[in-house]
Amino acid sequence: MSRVRICGLDTKVVRSDSADWDADGMGRMNSLTNTITLRRGMDKDVENHVLLHEVIHYICAVNGLPVGDDERQVAVLAASLFAFLRDNNFTAEKGCTEKVEE
């Protein structure tokens, strides 16, 4: 288990190989228990993408944003943000690391 802070809330990130996952399920979030659960055994890139997807659901849930109920909108936001962060070498410690000459 690990922890992340989302909207100022400590949130547990749990990896599970629970038998109750549906065939396509890769992650789920519960804003009442401040928990994000990820399917155990995913490739690291996939796991990070799924985590971002669930973080978007979480942000929407705790702020009452209806976009969090629309799986397609959340999937597009997660894929786009994940690609931006990955493709620009963005990390929490360093921000965007690539320098561009003007």
Image (cartoon, rainbow, N blue to C red):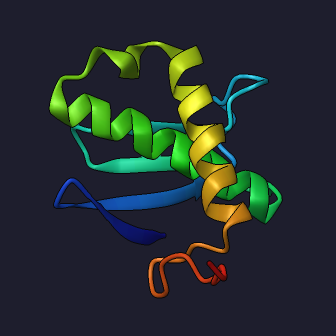
Vertically, is 99 above or below 21? Answer: below
The residue positioned 47% from the left and 13% from the top of the image is 70
Residue 92: percent from the left, percent from the top?
Answer: 45, 77
Quarter location, residue 31: top left
Q: Residue at x 18, y 23 (%)?
A: 64
Q: Nearer the viewer, residue 25 or 19?
A: 25
Q: State whether residue 50 is above or below residue 25.
A: below
For residue 32, which quarter of the picture?
Answer: top left
* Side (left or right) of 48 relative to 93: right
Q: Is residue 48 visible?
A: yes
Residue 16 visible here: no
Q: How many marks?
A: 0
Residue occupying the point 27% across, 49% down: 34
Q: Position of residue 54 (x, y in %)?
A: 48, 41
Q: Position of residue 48 (x, y in %)?
A: 64, 58
92 relative to 53 in the view: left or right: left
**Residue furthest front in the image:** 102
Quadrant for residue 99, please give it.
bottom right
Against 61, is 49 above or below? Answer: below
Q: Nearer the viewer, residue 12 or 86?
A: 86
Residue closer to the observer: 3 or 93: 93
Of residues 35 and 83, which is closer to you in this image?
83
- Could you tell me which residue is drawn at 50 percent across and 36 percent down? 28
User: Quarter of the image containing the C terminus?
Assistant: bottom right
Q: Is 2 situated left or right of 71 in this image?
A: left
